[in-house]
Structures are given as C-alpha cells and as structure tokens.
Amino acid sequence: MLRSKIVTIIFKIAILLTLTFLLTKKNIHVKIYNKTGHNIDSFFAGTTFIGHLSIDDSTEFISFRKFQFDSGYPYERLSGIMQKKILNQINWSWCGTERKTKSDGSYTFDIKVKSENGISYLYLVRHGGQLFNWQ
C-alpha cells in the first residue's frame, strides 16, 4: 500500500514537471546582427540578457518564449550600453492595434541605432531591411 502511494506521488510530480516545462518552453528563435556601428554591452532583448555584442557580429539563435511585433515589424523591448551611454528601444508606435505577440518561428534581425534631438535609441529590423525610411 505504501509503495503504491509513493509511485502515485512520483507520477504526479513527473506530470507537474512535464507541464511546467511545456508551459515555459521557449520556441521562437531569434538571431540579431549588430548594425549600430558600435559595440553594445549589457544588451537585453525583452527580458533575455544577451551581454556583449560586437560591431557587425551576431548572436547565435536565441530561444524566446514570445516576441512582440507591431505592424509586422519587430517591437521587442531593447536596452544596452553603447559608448558609455544607456540606450533603450525607440517607441515609434504609440498605437497598439497592430501589436502582436508571436511564440513560434525563426527570425533574423539587425539591431540599429537612431539618434534624434541628441538622444539615441535602439530598434530592430528584419536582417538587411530598414524601418520606414530611416537609415
């Protein structure tokens, strides 16, 4: 009887661990190329710490649980240190009607920098592309 209860408890724990794994599984894969012209330190994409990303270098494919897009453009939260300054993502869209969260697929992006009124911002575009008419 005791052996049966132990087996049942172990079985329930195994099911719980399996469900936890499946619910937290990251399955969108993203590769990011640094096209800012500068090294980026302490780089974050969303809540994922990437660390140092050298000029014209790229990450490996990184697994994310989800990734945000707006009107088909990548719109994930970004931050990093470039030339001893903390940079964050550019908020180019204040309307959220076209914002979508994707949780599967593989994407390759370029991280770029936009300076406006003495403030620099980070943003992502599809690899080899551009966001609107910015350079």
Image (spheres, rainbow, N blue to C red):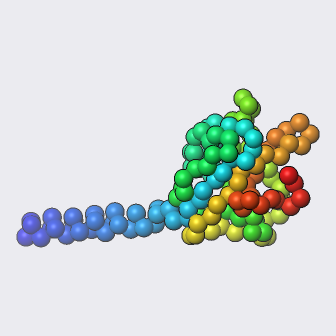
Residue 89 visible in the current orientation: no
Left or right, 96 with respect to 42, comes to: right
Viewer-side residue, 70 vs 129: 129
Q: Quadrant of residue 51?
A: top right
Left or right, 126 with respect to 24, comes to: right
Residue at x-position 73% and y-position 31%: 83
Compared with 52, 20 (above or below) is below
Left or right, 16 with respect to 112, comes to: left
- Number of numbered labels in the structure image: 0
Residue at x-position 71% and y-position 64%: 69
Residue at x-position 75% and y-position 44%: 36
Question: Residue 39's spot in the image, x, y percent?
Answer: 68, 37
Residue placed furthest toward the top: 84
Residue at x-position 28% and y-position 63%: 13
Viewer-side residue, 68 vs 50: 50
Q: Quadrant of residue 117?
A: top right
Question: Residue 126's spot in the image, x, y percent?
Answer: 72, 61
- State the quadrant of the N terminus: bottom left
Compared with 48, 13 (above or below) is below
Residue 120 visible in the current orientation: yes
Question: Residue 2's spot in the image, x, y percent?
Answer: 9, 65
Question: Residue 74's spot in the image, x, y percent?
Answer: 71, 61
